[in-house]
Image: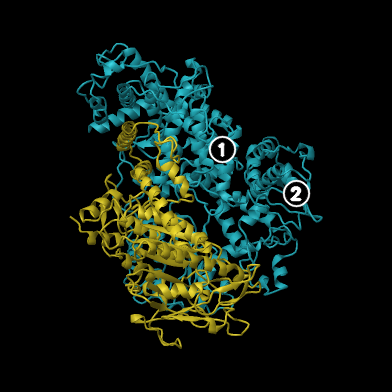
């Protein structure tokens, strides 16, 4: 056994069974054979590279234009096992159209020119030629169906891949706390999990999900999905229809009152769909209500714009009139903003048939339409957001000249267009009562358009979930309510929401079928989504299942165990924290924001303002995808945050005399030093910084033994270092590793020693230079018990170095 | 040892797989005399600044480089007169609009002294215009990806990302993204700097007041600051050694790479000041300075001069004009032209305009007629402008008929029978464009598959970014 494996195994076992006794290590030494089964060959070589990659799936799919072509029934679906069986059947069919040398159509059809003669032409034109790699690959597949391989694929995927080391329940709790509510768990919460293991974890997670900050996190997650925050600074209501849209302009308010009121009203209207999702979760309603609710959410501000009266209103004399805009805005935010309530809107004496966020003003305008687009953009996003189907990903561009199509109405008749349009046009038709301005009209919008130009309704497909699931009679005026019900009962809805939340919480990537990691990820999403659906769309259950599962908890894999590389390809989190998450973590761990005025708890953190986009955040408008790969700018932001925060918090914490009341320095005092400045003179600084312990666990240094202190009975420390001081400093370092990085390390761990070395070298450098200066930002005055203006013991700088080191660590800025 | 040429060939066939290792590329380039540490000063033929200018939303080439003019019918493509179209070398260039005080189009300019004519006249010798490119799509989701990557598959790396990964992958701002299609496919990080002044704050993480000229104090001595970073990196490397989950290994590696250029941002800050001095000396009108791509270029150019940037996307939006086309679309085209002039003026003032390699394109084109709302809808035939001194311009390739349909061309780019009966040739395709751009950059596609290892031992496949195309693909459009 190699040494490194031995240590890895020891560490893994130690943490699993000692630090967190109720979690397990899954070890399975079953070897994976190299032999490739027919199904695996299909998944890897046929499905993604050819069937999807060459665009076959666009037409030969269930409900596609070539679902049934000539004498061959295709009907490909999203289920690869079914598709494997389908292609095997086609390849083995004796009734299929035979080509040239007697081979069946599966192999040769795609080599034929465009046309409708089933024997000599292919309606989709030439997809590959006979000298191509694709042809050879397909030929091998056909050969395999005639001479099936004896190799087998593992049909059952384990819930936790073999060899995976999971985070223990307490460690999981810490990660969940930071992820869901932006704080580290309390001692009481940790004790609950320590005592009750899995059950305790579930209980504390339930408690987390009742906290206010959980719903702030949900607002981010949900906005990432529908991006309606684009409008938080815009007036999106049609002023002619909603005559009170800008009601704040009619009150003759001072500018700073009016502006505060204007901006919070805009925020309130834009957030309506996100607040509906929050409302559904908070009240433990089935999550499907987000597309079926026959109401919309208004708060006191948006209610006045919409002209409705909710149960809680804001009266004119509630409006603050300070000259301070920020003060006014904060007052309104704190006292009224979150008082959202469901209402049914009545516009011009017409009751709006609400269908959750589908009919929400902000949602409809976020996915706008035009006279020529006729709601296809909306349909594309309905499919993508709620039905787990991204047309742009799933269907390749057809290889035809779109500018030379002979058809009068090619979206109906030309195979180059129908692959996509047959999927999205029926759903587009369901938006027929909602126009470009997101206004409802019982009258068919297509008919309205036809008054001035072409008769679009005659050019559109049948209205419904698909051509094969048309909308029944009786829903002409409330077609989106029908759509909401269909989405709810469609298995793809649960899968879509599950996929989004899994990706949002764990950074799981989108993996194409046939690619490494797909099978495992798909099995997990399938399992979670089925449970989500069975629980009547209980959103909190879904969160708990993800948190408790391997995607969230995987932290390593045992090297001694043969693992299935495909299964472990994408699990674990390993994602840079978003600006919002990092900001909350800083405040939770250090007790204050990183901001212009860090002493003001209401001050907006840098990461949510000036650095938000630089640090990969989104504005829901032009920047809609979070940047999760760090770049040099982000690395510098992390380092600047670390130096600034370390400067601010060290003297501040030492300014509190009672160690039990401190956050960071619960063991060390600033007077605790291992040796004096005069003693340090005798030690070469280069020796103090030697990296012996970093290279080998038992490395030695020229001057001092690296294993300075191993416990009360161990005196193998340098002759000049005071054991009592070293112990307290190391205990504090141990505390900081847990508090800042979530690492539970024994006092003799090499990491503790390494951090101590950094402390000691920094202390020595400043002591030798007799440098006691502190920048004003790093002092403590008028806070706590004592003022600290200088570094009399040279330890403030040493602790600043340690805090900077830990705050810039991978485990602080990543999750 | 692999030669630089061999290496570049391999880059052409992929530049790298999903986990390319910048260290390997650095070492190879260095070994062949390519000064990777400062891309701008590198003694190599390909140290140009590659700029992918995207007209977001689908621009109208008939209003710029493929004009038709008003034929007097109800199906007219343009509202300017055919006589107002000007010949510039082989090019036909549309006139600029004249606006009234309300900002609406109120006629078109004729003759010299106009923005469009002057620009193409001045820079035609370094220019190639390709008209009649068939985008195969009318979708905003597909078009930008297709034109800038050469593939319609989601997740394919964009050309500017590939160029950056080829020449200076570990420079901190090797690829700067200002919008448009900027997929990197994991080759390297894309940096988005929307506010350059903020960079000054973060470029000096050890300075207490980084933007102050009077307070120069630091949080730590340089020695301590270096010690902190060294300790951090050592711990990181130790943990990385024992981490075996692929996703976590990849995440740790990416963080390591991002830290390589931490200190180089300081060079960028000093260049930004120098660039602003040059800009001030040009005395340009506000239209030039305020154009969106001018402002984006200012930051990109400073980073390029600092030796830390190879390529960038520049982006001007507002081209998706389904209604009120001329009034909304033409000002945005003007902005693109102001911006291009700014780029050439600024780099020209410093004697390096011949190092600018600019590509201008869009999602697709717009319909060859006005709709009922006076707008123009999506149309798959469009154009690209390429500005690069190696091209040997002026060069006009491709074309469209009176109905804005792509014409076909045979070998040597000779047009097929103009009546359209000869179909032995083909229209210019995006795969032609992308292969030719790779050849222009010296990273042409290559047919061998190859694997290599990065400094951390990750194996990657260099074949991942090859342009998949049939044997008829053209690669000689530009050189």
CA neighbours of label 1 inside 10 A, class few (<14), some (14 to 19), many (20+): some
> Label 1's element?
loop
Residue located beneath label 2 in the image? A249
The residue marked by circle 1 belongs to what chain?
A
Q: Position of residue A329 (x, y in %)?
A: 67, 39
Residue under the point 39% across and 33% down: B218
- Looking at the figure, which quarter contains the C terminus of chain A? top left
B315, A385: nearer the viewer: B315
Q: Is residue B128 visible?
A: yes
A739, A457: nearer the viewer: A739
Colour of chain A, in one word, is cyan
The residue marked by circle 2 belongs to what chain?
A
Q: Is residue A234 left or right of residue A194?
A: right
Q: Is residue A41 visible?
A: no
Task: Tell me which colouring the rendered structure shows.
Answer: by chain
B200, A644: nearer the viewer: B200
Say which quarter of the image contains residue A427: bottom right
Q: Is residue A384 left or right of residue B35?
A: right
Q: Position of residue A787 (x, y in %)?
A: 49, 19
Q: CA distance from mark 2 to mark 1?
A: 27 Å
Say which quarter of the image contains residue A81: bottom left
> Label 2's element?
helix
Q: Write down which chain is painted yellow.
A: B
Q: Which mark is residue A604?
A: 1
Mark 2 vs mark 1: which is more N-terminal?
A: 2
- Looking at the figure, which quarter contains the N terminus of chain A? top left
Please tell me if label 2 and label 1 are on a single chain: yes
- Seen in the picture, residue B228 relative to A49 is either above or below; the reply is above
The extreme left residue here reads: B1
Q: Position of residue B54 (x, y in %)?
A: 47, 63
B448, B87: nearer the viewer: B87
CA neighbours of label 2 inside 10 A, class few (<14), some (14 to 19), many (20+): some
């Amino acid at each position: 056994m190699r040494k490194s494996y031995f240590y890895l195994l020891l560490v893994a076992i130690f943490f699993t069974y000692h630090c967190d006794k109720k979690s397990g290590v899954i070890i399975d030494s079953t070897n994976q054979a190299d032999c490739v089964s027919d199904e695996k060959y299909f998944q890897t070589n046929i499905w993604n590279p050819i069937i999807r990659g060459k665009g076959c799936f666009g037409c030969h799919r269930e409900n596609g234009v070539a679902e049934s072509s000539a004498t061959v029934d295709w009907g490909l679906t999203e289920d690869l096992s079914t598709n494997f069986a389908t292609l095997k059947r086609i390849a083995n069919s004796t009734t299929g159209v035979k080509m040239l040398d007697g081979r069946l159509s599966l192999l040769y059809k795609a080599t034929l020119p465009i046309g409708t003669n089933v024997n000599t032409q292919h309606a989709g034109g030439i997809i590959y030629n006979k000298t191509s790699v694709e042809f050879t690959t397909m030929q091998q597949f056909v050969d395999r169906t005639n001479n099936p391989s004896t190799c087998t694929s593992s049909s059952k995927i384990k819930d936790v891949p073999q060899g995976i080391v999971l985070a223990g329940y307490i460690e999981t709790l810490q990660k969940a706390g930071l992820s869901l509510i932006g704080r580290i768990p309390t001692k009481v919460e940790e004790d609950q999990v320590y005592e009750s293991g899995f059950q305790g974890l579930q209980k504390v997670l339930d408690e987390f999900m009742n906290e206010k900050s959980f719903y702030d996190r949900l607002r981010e997650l949900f906005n990432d999905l529908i991006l309606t925050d684009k409008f938080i600074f815009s007036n999106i209501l049609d002023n002619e229809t909603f005559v009170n849209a800008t009601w704040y302009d009619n009150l003759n308010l001072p500018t700073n009152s009016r502006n505060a009121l204007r901006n919070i009203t805009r925020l309130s209207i834009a957030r309506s769909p996100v607040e509906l999702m929050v409302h559904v979760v908070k009240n433990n309603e089935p999550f499907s209500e987000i597309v079926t609710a026959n109401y919309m959410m208004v708060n006191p501000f948006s209610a006045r714009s919409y002209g409705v009266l909710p149960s809680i209103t804001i009266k004119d004399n509630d409006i603050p009139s300070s000259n301070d805009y920020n003060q006014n805005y904060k007052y309104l935010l704190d006292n009224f903003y979150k008082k959202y309530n469901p209402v049914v809107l009545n516009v011009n004496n017409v009751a709006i048939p609400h269908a959750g966020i589908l009919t929400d003003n902000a949602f409809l305008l976020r996915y706008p339409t035009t006279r020529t687009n006729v709601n296809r953009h909306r349909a594309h996003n309905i499919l993508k957001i709620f039905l787990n189907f991204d047309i742009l990903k799933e269907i390749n561009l057809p290889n035809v000249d779109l500018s030379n199509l002979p058809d009068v109405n090619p979206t109906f008749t030309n195979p180059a267009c129908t692959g996509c349009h047959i999927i999205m046009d029926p759903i587009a038709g369901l938006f027929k009562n909602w126009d470009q301005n997101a206004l409802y009209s019982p009258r068919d919008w297509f008919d309205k358009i036809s008054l001035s130009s072409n008769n679009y309704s005659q050019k559109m497909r049948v209205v419904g979930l698909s051509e094969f699931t048309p909308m029944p009679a009786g829903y002409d005026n409330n077609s989106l309510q029908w759509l909401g019900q269909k989405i709810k009962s469609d298995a793809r809805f649960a899968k879509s929401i599950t996929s989004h939340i899994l990706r949002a919480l764990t950074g799981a990537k989108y993996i194409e079928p046939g690619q490494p990691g797909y099978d495992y990820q798909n099995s997990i999403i399938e399992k979670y989504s089925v449970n989500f659906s069975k629980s009547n769309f209980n959103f909190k259950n879904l969160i708990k299942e993800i948190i408790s599962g391997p995607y969230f908890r995987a932290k390593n894999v045992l090297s001694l165990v043969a693992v299935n590389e495909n299964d472990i390809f994408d699990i674990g989190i390993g994602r840079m924290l978003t600006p919002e998450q990092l900001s909350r973590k800083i405040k939770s761990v250090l007790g204050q924001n990183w901001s212009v005025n860090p002493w003001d708890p209401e001050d907006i953190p840098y990461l949510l303002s000036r650095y938000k986009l630089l640090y990969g955040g989104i504005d829901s408008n032009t920047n809609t995808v979070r940047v999760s790969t760090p770049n040099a700018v982000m690395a510098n932001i992390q380092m600047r945050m670390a130096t600034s925060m370390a400067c601010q918090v060290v003297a501040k914490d030492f300014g509190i005399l009672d160690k039990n009341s401190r956050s960071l320095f619960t063991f060390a005092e600033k007077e605790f030093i291992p040796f004096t400045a005069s003693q340090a003179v005798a030690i070469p600084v280069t020796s103090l910084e030697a990296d012996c312990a970093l290279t080998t666990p038992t490395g030695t240094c020229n001057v001092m033994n690296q294993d300075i202190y191993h416990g009360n009975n161990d005196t193998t420390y340098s002759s000049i270092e005071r054991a009592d001081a070293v112990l307290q400093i190391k205990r504090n370092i141990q505390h900081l590793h847990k508090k800042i990085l979530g690492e539970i390390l024994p006092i003799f761990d090499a990491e503790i020693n390494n951090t101590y070395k950094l402390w000691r070298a920094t202390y020595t450098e400043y002591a030798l230079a007799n440098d006691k200066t502190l920048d004003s930002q790093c002092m403590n005055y008028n806070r706590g018990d004592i003022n600290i203006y200088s570094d009399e013991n040279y330890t403030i700088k040493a602790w600043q170095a340690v805090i900077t080191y830990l705050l810039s660590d991978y485990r602080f800025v990543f999750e | 040892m692999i030669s630089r040429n061999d290496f570049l060939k391999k880059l052409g066939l992929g530049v790298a797989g999903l986990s390319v290792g910048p260290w390997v590329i650095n070492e190879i380039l260095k070994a062949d005399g390519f000064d990777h540490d400062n891309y701008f000063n590198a003694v190599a033929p390909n140290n140009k600044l590659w700029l992918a200018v995207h007209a977001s939303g689908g621009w109208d080439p008939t209003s710029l480089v493929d004009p038709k003019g008003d034929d007097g019918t109800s199906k007219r493509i343009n509202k300017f007169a055919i006589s107002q179209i000007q010949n510039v070398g082989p090019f036909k260039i549309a006139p600029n609009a004249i606006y009234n005080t309300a900002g609406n189009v109120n006629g078109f300019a004729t003759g010299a002294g106009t923005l469009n004519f002057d620009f193409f006249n001045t820079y035609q010798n370094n220019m190639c215009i390709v008209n009649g490119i068939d985008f195969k799509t009318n979708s905003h989701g597909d078009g930008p990806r297709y034109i800038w990557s050469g593939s319609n598959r989601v997740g394919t790396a964009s050309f500017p990302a590939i160029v950056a990964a080829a020449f200076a992958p570990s420079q901190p701002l090797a690829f700067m993204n200002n919008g448009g299609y900027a997929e990197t496919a994991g080759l390297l990080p894309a940096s988005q700097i929307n506010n350059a002044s903020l960079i000054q704050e973060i470029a000096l993480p050890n300075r207490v007041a980084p933007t102050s000229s009077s307070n120069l104090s630091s949080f730590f001595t340089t020695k301590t600051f270096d010690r902190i970073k060294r300790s951090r990196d050592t711990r990181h490397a130790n943990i990385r050694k024992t981490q075996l989950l692929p996703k976590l290994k990849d995440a740790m590696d990416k963080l390591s790479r991002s830290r390589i250029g931490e200190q180089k941002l300081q060079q960028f800050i000093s260049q930004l000041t120098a660039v602003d001095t040059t800009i001030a000396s040009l005395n340009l009108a506000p239209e030039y300075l305020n154009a969106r791509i001018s402002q984006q270029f200012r930051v990109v150019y400073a980073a390029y001069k600092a030796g830390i940037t190879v390529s960038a996307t520049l982006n001007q939006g507002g081209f998706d004009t389904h209604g009120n086309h001329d009034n909304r679309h033409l000002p945005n085209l003007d902005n693109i032209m102001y911006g291009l002039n700014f780029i050439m003026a600024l780099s020209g003032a410093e004697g390096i305009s011949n190092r600018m390699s600019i590509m201008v394109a869009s999602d697709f084109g717009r319909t060859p007629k006005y709709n009922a709302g006076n707008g123009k809808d999506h149309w798959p035939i469009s154009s690209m402008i390429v500005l690069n001194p190696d091209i040997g311009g002026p060069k006009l390739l491709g074309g469209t008929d009176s109905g804005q349909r792509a014409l076909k061309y045979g070998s040597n780019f000779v047009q097929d029978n103009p009546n359209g009966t000869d179909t032995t040739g083909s229209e210019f395709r995006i795969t032609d464009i992308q292969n030719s751009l790779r050849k222009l950059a010296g990273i042409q596609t290559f047919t061998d598959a190859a694997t290599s290892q990065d400094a951390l031992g990750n194996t990657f496949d260099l074949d991942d970014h090859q342009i998949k195309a049939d044997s008829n693909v053209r690669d000689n459009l530009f050189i």
